Image: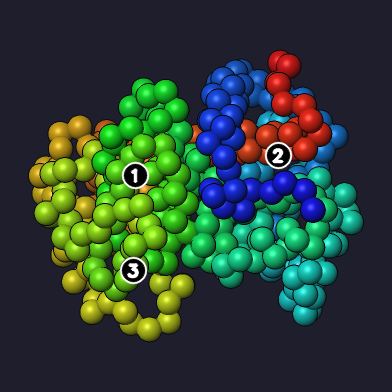
Amino acid sequence: MSRSLISISDLTDAEIEKILDLSKVFAEVNSREIPKVPALKGKTVATLFFENSTRTRLSFELAASRLSADVITFSVAGSSVAKGESLRDTAETIESLGADLIVMRHPSSGSVKLVSEWLRVPMVNAGDGAFQHPTQGLLDAVTLIEHFKSENNLNGVRIGIIGDVIHSRVARSNIQLMSRLGAEVVLVGPPAFLPSDISAWPVKVSYSLDEVLPELDVLYLLRIQSERFSDAVLPSLADFSSSYLLSRDRLKRARKDAVVMHPGPVIRGVEIAHEIVDSERSLIRRQVENGVPVRMAVLYWLLAANEGKLDPAW
Ligand code: NCD
């Protein structure tokens, strides 16, 4: 079993700093006319996705190919999982094919950790159930550090994570990472979408977006992740939107310099008004752009750190 990245809590403060620094190195690589370096030439990165994805999967694959690694991709549709192959057999097959690192997404919380215990190669959790999505947290941190022009910290920044927090792995990774970087995190949503006991969470809670809005520097919206709950926990979508949709009117009542974030996919008109997504207050496109250098940093850090060499020599 090698060093893997399953959760933000796997990382020491020094390791977080290292990954943030490496992201800057790889952002420069990405800005070149030919955005490619031979850092992982000869390595094979596999993406093993048991759940849908657009930006996470594509940015991991782009990150691996910009580091000159070979990339093999697996999706459930068209695989032997459809014939009844077990998770363990599937993962071991990918390892036997020669993958040096596996990026995995799965609908069950804890599944990536479980697989990492069966395998020898390092793994990166690209989202497991409602548990963790550490590279999303890292790319969001990079986006905010860049926006606030701070030195690898978010000291004093007030971040509201708004909407369906309870079903969100993005929220869990962001709460841990942002608070460790010095931010104050407020969870905002209806009781059905917030944890009932926050005593172990480094956060405050509010049921009223209108009340906390004027205090927030960052409005981080979440999609209602209905694939993760079976019962109708909400009275109606219209009720949700009337209290929590970030509308143009609500944004007018926020701080003049407050910025808007969302991990995607965005459901325009439910959690955020159509025109705000593309407005100058929105960092949503920047989050996607930062996904590539951050994932290059994570892949490089895991593969090179496991071999004892860490300084990019290009
Ligand atoms: C998120 C996810 O899959 O957890 N998306 C992403 O990775 N950018 C959030 C979501 O699905 O709503």
Q: Distance between the residues labelled 2 and 3?
A: 34 Å
Name the element at disc 1: strand
Nearest to N terminus: mark 3 or mark 1: 3
Residue in the image at 80% along x and 75% along y: 85
Q: Residue at x 68, y 34 (%)?
A: 301
The image's mark for residue 302 is 2
Q: Name the residue under label 3.
A: 197
Residue located beneath label 1 in the image: 261
Q: What element carries label 3?
A: loop
Q: Residue furthest front?
A: 199
Mark 2 or mark 3, whichever is nearer to me: 3
Residue 8 at x, y = what percent?
A: 53, 48
Sooner in the amino-acid sequence: mark 2 or mark 1: 1
Q: Quadrant of residue 187?
A: bottom left
Q: Position of residue 117 (x, y in %)?
A: 75, 61
- Whether the residue carrying mark 2 lies under 8 Å from ligand 1 is answered with no
Label 3, label 1: how far apart the Cα atoms are: 25 Å
| Kind of residue at badge 3 | Asp
**Label 2 secondary element:** helix
Left or right: 178 as drawn, with respect to 46: left
